[in-house]
Amino acid sequence: MVVGRIGRPHGVRGQVTVEVRTDDPDLRFAPGATLLTEPAARGPLTVEAARWHSGTLLLTLAGPDGVVVAGREAADELRNTMLLVPVEKLPELDDPDSFYDHQLVGLAAELPDGTPIGEVTGVRHEGTELLVVRRPDRAELLVPFVTAIVPTVDLAAGRLVVDPPEGLLDL
């Protein structure tokens, strides 16, 4: 599961900025944490130090060989690397109405009467979460992931119900 994306270097000592994609960055990016990477050849990476600067997370990382990434050029080679944690290391969610992205991807999307809409192929985080639904022979559909529009998520059955407001399916 993606927990962050490495951005541009910060300074000249090898620190990188991170676009955080987790609700618990202090746990995921704690010193000593090992993160898988996409592309895999860039990792795994170990967090040596973490700090916040003007609302941006800055990390000092060590590469797979244990050597700390030093210098702006070395840090820039990590740009756009996705930082991942194995799904099996994720904690259970306390709220029954909360889901990890990987749990939603692959679910069948249906209307309340059971009419199929398509399949969830992704989740976008753009202020509000949006389910990306691939529809057969039609354009992708972005569905706001809010209870009023997605009242039912049934992981065991592999489906979710979309009760769209007027016009949503026509977009």
Image: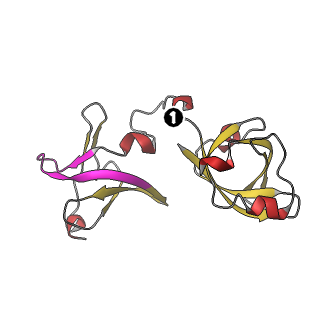
Residue closer to the observer: 111 or 46: 46
Can you give x and y, in whole percent of width and height, for residue 49 in the image? 82, 44
Looking at the picture, tell me which residue is in the foreground, 75 or 112: 75
Secondary structure at numbered mark 1: helix
Question: In the drawing, does residue 84 fall left or right of residue 106?
Answer: right
Percent across and percent down for residue 167 are 21, 68
Residue 10 visible in the snapshot: no
Residue at 61% across, 47% down: 40
> In this rendering, would 37 be left or right of 169?
right
Nearest the camera: 161 or 44?
44
Q: Residue at x 86, y 55 (%)?
A: 70
* Above-or-below relation of 70 to 8: above
Q: Most extreme residue toward the bottom, as rendered?
A: 171
Pinpoint residue 161: horizontal percent, then vertical percent.
Answer: 23, 46
In which image quadrant can residue 13 be found?
A: bottom right
Q: Which of 147 and 82 is in front in this view?
A: 82
- Identify the residue under disc 1: 87
Classed neighbour count for the residue bearing mark 1: other residues with Cα under 10 Å, few (<14), some (14–19), many (≥20) = few
What's drawn in magenta, residue-wise?
108-123
Residue 14 percent location from the top left of the image: 83, 57
Name the residue: 16% across, 47% down: 112
Residue 107 in the figure: left or right of residue 78:
left
- Assess whether residue 111 is covered by the magenta stretch: yes
Prevailing SS of the magenta stretch:
strand
Coloring scheme used: secondary structure
Residue type, numbered disc 1: Val
In reply to whether residue 39 is colored magenta, the answer given is no
Residue 96 visible somewhere in the drawing = yes
Residue 68 vs residue 98: left or right?
Answer: right
Q: How many tags in the picture?
A: 1
Q: In which quarter of the image is the C terminus?
A: bottom left
